[in-house]
Image (spheres, grey):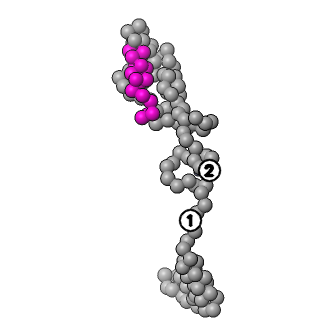
Amino acid sequence: MGKNWRRGKSKNIGLTACNAIAGRLKADYLTFSTWDRVGKKYGVSGGLAYRVANGYEPRGAKARAALGFPVLVPAPACACGEVHLRKGRCPNAPKPTPPAWVTAAADLLACRERVAPAPVRVYGRGGKAVTW
Ligand SMILES: [Zn+2]
């Protein structure tokens, strides 16, 4: 894989890795006997340590790193060479050109406007339309 990385989604971590972290926390709980002390060991709250031990996967990068969850996963780069977080059309790709008739119609309208400029409507006081 290349040098491009982005934050991984929860589905990218294998269940085995999840269970390994949860198992480690449970083992720590047996050692320390309170979740607060388990959390302290990893630098997270006791509540979070408890939830992770029961299968929860933290979202925050800090907590993930502290508990040993993979924070970064390799992401394939787009054809333009960048990694986009959003799926779909590449924002760097050239915009699709409008069909020829659209261009022709726009030219026609512009031409007509030059011959007879559209009346300017100004709304005066009381919402009364004034045209000149
Ligand atoms: Zn792109």
Residue 96: image tag: 1
In this orientation, which residue lies closer to the viewer: 57 or 42?
Answer: 57
Q: Which residue is located at x 57 percent, y 88 percent?
A: 119
Mark toward the start of the polypeptide (1 vs 2) = 2
| Label 2 CB less than 8 angstroms from ligand 1 | yes
Residue at the left extreme of this rendering: 54
Residue 52 appears in the rendering: no
- The spot of residue 52 in percent (x, y) is 40, 24
Q: How far separated are the C-alphas under marks 1 and 2? A: 16 Å
- The spot of residue 26 in percent (x, y) is 38, 15
Compared with residue 51, is residue 112 higher up or lower down, i.e. above or below? below
Magenta region, main secondary structure: helix
Q: Is residue 75 left or right of residue 56?
A: right
Residue under label 2, please give it: 80
Q: Secondary structure at mark 1?
A: loop
Q: Secondary structure at mark 2?
A: loop
Q: Quadrant of residue 124?
A: bottom right
Compared with residue 9, is residue 103 higher up or lower down, i.e. above or below? below
The stretch in magenta equals 10-26
Q: Which residue is located at x 45 percent, y 33 percent?
A: 12
In magenta segment, residue 89: no
